Image (cartoon, rainbow, N blue to C red):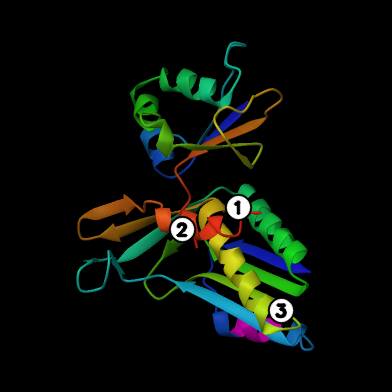
């Protein structure tokens, strides 16, 4: 059982997580990850630039398909009861939740590992693109080699 | 076939989607990039550094060496940055 949502509307991670827990009330372990929009870019808030807003472009159809495929792969690797992935697109402001990943299973090890796997693969394979707006204007975020390295560790 | 562009590839080319009919000599994704790059300045700029442009055929990530036979939808975009 999986639920994949790609949406322009803001979502409330707390109520999504509550609902997910209620739907999986007998799963012993639930792991969640929330990615939020930062208000800076660069190494740190002090050394970086202030980011005022962000726009997320995506490939409609392929984004949903890719996330479904990733969830299916996670279900093959771990005995998961349920997976939830929500990803925003369109305009965002700092503090907005961009992504929520939740996995439900019997024990914490599988819950943590599968949630991390989903995030690592989502970062390098799901067709979303961030454009940040700073005082200098709007620029596309560049992919990070560290994300590729992180995803590579799950290769089989 | 239908060709889609995303993020800065779309901005450089100036459209997000178009229908194209390349000649039969355009056999692979890399061939299609060459053919598109010759269509104008925006296209040339978008495909200037091929290492920065990724492709999907019928919504599946593919390397540039992939054959186009039967492809209905080809997309070009920068490395993804979601999450």
User: Which of the image's four quarters has the N terminus of chain A?
Assistant: bottom right
Q: Residue A110 in the image: state x and y as whole percent.
A: 69, 76
The chain holding disc 1 is A
In the rendered view, tell whether residue A18 sits above or below residue B38.
Answer: below
* Secondary structure found at label 3: strand
Give me the C-alpha separation between circle 3 and circle 2. Answer: 24 Å
- Whether residue B78 appears in this view of the structure is yes
Residue A82 at x, y percent in the picture: 75, 74
Q: Which of the numbered marks, if any, corresponds to residue A63?
A: 1
Counting labels gives 3
From this viewpoint, is residue A89 visible? no
Q: Nearer the viewer, mark 3 or mark 2?
A: 2
Q: Which residue is mark 2?
A: A147
The percent position of residue A86, horizontal first and vertical second, equals 60, 68
Along the viewing direction, whichever of B43 and A103 lies nearer the viewer: A103
Q: Could you give the CA–CA distance between mark 3 and mark 1, rounded to whole angstroms? A: 22 Å
Q: At 77% across and 88% down in the image, what residue appears?
A: A25
Q: Which range is magenta? A: A15-20
- Residue A25's place in the image compared with B27, above or below, is below
Q: Nearer the viewer, mark 2 or mark 1?
A: 2
- Prevalent SS, magenta region: helix
Would you place residue A70 above or below residue B24 in this image?
A: below
Image quarter in which the C terminus of chain A is found: bottom right
Q: At which x and y percent is residue A150?
A: 50, 60
Which residue shows up at 41% across the image and 52% down it?
A143
Mark 3 or mark 1, which has the lower sequence index? 1
**Discs 3, 2 touching: Cβ within 8 Å:** no
Q: Residue at x 41, y 38 (%)?
A: B52
């Amino acid at each position: 059982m999986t639920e994949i949502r790609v949406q322009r509307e803001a979502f409330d991670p707390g109520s999504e997580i509550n609902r997910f827990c209620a739907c999986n009330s007998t799963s012993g372990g639930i792991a969640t990850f929330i990615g939020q929009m930062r208000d800076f870019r660069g190494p740190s808030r002090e050394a970086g630039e202030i980011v005022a807003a962000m726009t997320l472009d995506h490939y409609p159809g392929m984004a949903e398909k890719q996330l479904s495929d990733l969830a299916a792969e996670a279900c093959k690797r771990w005995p998961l009861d349920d997976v939830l992935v929500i990803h925003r697109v369109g305009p965002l402001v700092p503090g907005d939740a961009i992504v929520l990943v939740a996995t439900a299973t019997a024990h914490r090890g599988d819950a943590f590992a599968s949630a991390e796997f989903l995030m690592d693969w989502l970062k390098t394979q799901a067709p979303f693109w961030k454009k940040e707006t700073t005082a200098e204007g709007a620029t596309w975020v560049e992919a990070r080699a560290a994300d590729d390295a992180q995803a590579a560790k799950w290769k089989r | 076939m239908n060709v889609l562009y995303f993020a800065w590839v779309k901005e450089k080319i100036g459209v997000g989607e178009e229908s194209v009919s390349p000649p039969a000599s355009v056999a692979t994704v890399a061939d299609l990039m060459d053919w598109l790059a010759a269509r104008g300045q925006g296209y040339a700029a978008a495909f200037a550094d091929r290492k920065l442009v990724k492709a999907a055929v019928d919504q599946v990530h593919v390397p540039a060496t992939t054959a186009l036979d039967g492809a209905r939808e080809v997309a070009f975009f920068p490395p993804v940055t979601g999450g």
